[in-house]
Amino acid sequence: MIDQPLITLNDGRQMPQLGYGVFQVPPEDTRRLVVDAIELGYQAIDTATFYRNEAEVGQAIRDSGGRPFVTTKLWNDCQGYDQALRAFDASYKALGLDAIDLYLIHWPKPALNLYVETWKALIRLRDEGRVRTIGVSNFTMTYLERIIHDTGVVPAVNQIELHPYFQQIELRAYHDESNIVTTSWSPLGRGGVLADPVIASIARKHGRTPAQAIIRWHIESGLTVIPKSSNRQRQAENLDVFDFSLDQEDMRAIARLDRADGRIGPDPDLL
């Protein structure tokens, strides 16, 4: 088993710093790829209702005999207090696990103005012991401040788009001040960062692939990270990042890659 760091959350629980994400993994491929990931040594799996592969994730975990840390997320059409409770029941049944380790609101969806009521439902689920830890995804400071003000409960995690071209420095600083762990989705910029000459140079310097250099940057930045791959060899490569380190020159060079227009996914204020 690869020795991997754990991040302590604000509720005292721990979360593996590196996980395997199954966004856009077809259901018919999910079981095989998740079994591969667990066999390779991944200790966390990230799914969501919207991915339509929760059942296959659960089956893979049972087939593998392992028990990784499992995150899933509530989709936009299930926002609201009662709807969120029902959505959780459906995810819990689909996964078929003893417990869901981390349950997130997938998007704030401000046009609905239901994310506070949804957050209250997640608090109830946590308090009843039906989910171990609760958090959010794609929340800006505005939405974080509102749910914290209205409920007094700080999310343990905010999962956001984050990669060298879109580093979210201000939001990460707020997370640090509020004791919220940052999880990076699309950590490789959907592959768009891999060909960057700065990343390529750093990778060559350490005898690593560009993906490994980027994942290592996430790790050394104190982020949790969930790269996706549909290839077992690349899954293994993405996990093989704990026996080298970037130096300060590398970190400064990657910091300079941040772009004002670096976002590639939806803007949470507009979705």
Image: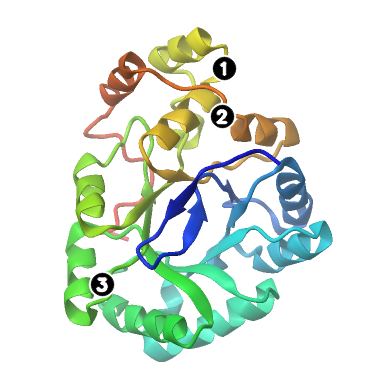
Whether residue 178 is situated above or below residue 244 in the rendered picture = below
Please tell me whether mark 2 sits on a helix, a strand or a loop.
loop
Mark 2 is surrounded, within 10 Å at the Cα level, by few (under 14), some (14 to 19) or many (20 or more) other residues, namely many
Q: CA distance from mark 3 to mark 2?
A: 40 Å
Q: Nearer the viewer, residue 45 or 246?
A: 246
Three-letter code for the amino acid on which mark 3 is drawn: Ala
- The residue indicated by pointer 3 is 111
Q: Position of residue 132 (x, y in %)?
A: 50, 73
Identify the residue at horizontal 30%, vertical 80% (top origin): 114
Please tell me whether mark 3 sits on a helix, a strand or a loop.
loop
Whether residue 86 is situated above or below residue 227 in the rendered picture = below
Mark 1 is surrounded, within 10 Å at the Cα level, by few (under 14), some (14 to 19) or many (20 or more) other residues, namely some
| First of labels 3, 1 by sequence position | 3
Three-letter code for the amino acid on which mark 1 is drawn: Arg
- Residue 169's quadrant in the figure? top left
Q: Are marks 3 and 1 in contact (CB under 8 Å)?
A: no
| First of labels 3, 2 by sequence position | 3
Q: Which mark is residue 263?
A: none
Whether residue 107 is situated above or below residue 132 in the rendered picture = above
Three-letter code for the amino acid on which mark 2 is drawn: Val
Q: Are marks 1 and 2 in contact (CB under 8 Å)?
A: yes
In the rendered structure, the answer to whether residue 1 lies left or right of residue 8 reads right
Q: Position of residue 214 (x, y in %)?
A: 46, 28
Q: Which mark is residue 241?
A: 2
Q: Position of residue 240 (x, y in %)?
A: 62, 30
- The residue indicated by pointer 1 is 208
Q: CA distance from mark 1 to mark 2?
A: 9 Å
